Image: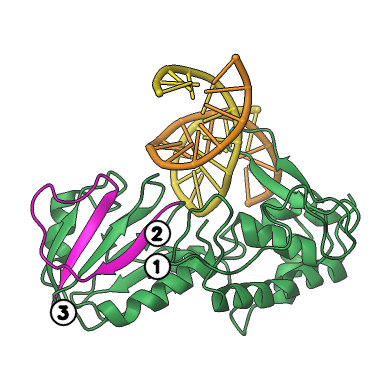
Chain colours: A green, B orange, C yellow
Amino acid sequence: MPELPEAETVRAQIEPHVVGQTILDSFAKTAHLTSPSVEEFIERTRGQKIIGAKRRGKQIYFPLGNGDNLLVHLGMTGRLHVEDQGEWKPGEFSKHVHGAFLLESGKRWIFTDPRTFGELGVSRELPFLSKMGPEPIDPDFPIELLVEKLSRKNLKIKAAILDQSLIAGLGNIYADEACFRARIHPETRANTLSPEQLRELLSHMRPILEEAIRARGATLKDGGYLDANGQFGEFRPQIYGRKGDACVNCESVIERGVLGASKSARSFHFCPSCQPK
DNA sequence: CTATAGACCTGACGGC
DNA sequence: TGCCGTCAGGTCTATA
């Protein structure tokens, strides 16, 4: 699923196609539009020059010449790509196309999202910039501050590091990977971990995310994420989605559990030997 | 304020 | 062959 490395891969791949281009025509139909209406979205994006391609956590956004920002969140199944074909006809797009932009280059830029957990919008304000926590790939990632914050939380550690307001960018895959490499059971309460354990957990995040960015993200066995060129990501998790496989450290069998009891509970994967409870 | 639960959504998959 | 229930999770909202 798209997390920080997948969002960054897509952002970087789309950037050269769209930055400097003026949007000649816009199409949108999604119910997951954050701006007030489809009509307003089209009105505020059409004719605007795209002046940047940025990302914060999993949120991608494109500053426009008029001071607005085109917002894209990939959610679970959102994809961005550019097609050589330019203009479209009414009714031409498949039901999964939620946005399209005709560019000066004659190409068109498409947002698809079968499960519609993603988001397309236009906004002048960017409240997520201040609401999100620091990013592990930032050179100034404040490990000591986060050790202090985490040591006061009673949440299970995996739930805590999935909180985007605390740390931005981790989703289910990379949260599991970080716990595994730090040899911490994902259900351990954050406030029961030592400062050394928390420090190690936090220190593992940057190399994992950087490795995943170099691999253009992670595509799992069941498919899902594709980069902007329609290719699979080549990052291979050591623990996520590998229930029943042998642990790379000790050859114990990897297990899977569920965080919490709610209907929206998240799975977690762990090695019972390397990550004892 | 903190922790937990529910809702949203639909393609893929397994059972019968 | 085809129907149907279950699973997947990023993020917002509700509740105790």
Q: Chain of mark 2?
A: A
Residue A115 picture location, percent across and down: 40, 44
Mark 2 or mark 3, whichever is nearer to me: 3
Mark 1 or mark 3, whichever is nearer to me: 3
Which region of the structure is painted magenta? Answer: A77-104
Q: Report the Cα–Cα distance between label 2 and label 3.
A: 24 Å
Q: Residue at horizontal 82%, vertical 64%?
A: A248
**Residue topped by disc 3:** A105
Could one spot residue A53 in this view of the protein? no
Helix, strand, or loop for circle 2?
strand
Residue A87 painted magenta: yes
Residue A157 picture location, percent across and down: 75, 54
**Residue topped by disc 1:** A60
Q: Amino acid at mark 3?
A: Ser
Query: Counting residues from the N terminus, which is met first, the one under dot 1 or under dot 3?
Result: 1
- Which quadrant of the figure has residue C1? top left
Query: Counting residues from the N terminus, which is met first, the one under dot 2 or under dot 3?
Result: 2
**Residue topped by disc 2:** A73
Residue A186 painted magenta: no
Residue A155 picture location, percent across and down: 73, 49
The reply to whether callout 1 and callout 3 are in contact (CB within 8 Å) is no
Would residue A150 be found to the left or right of residue A26 on screen?
right
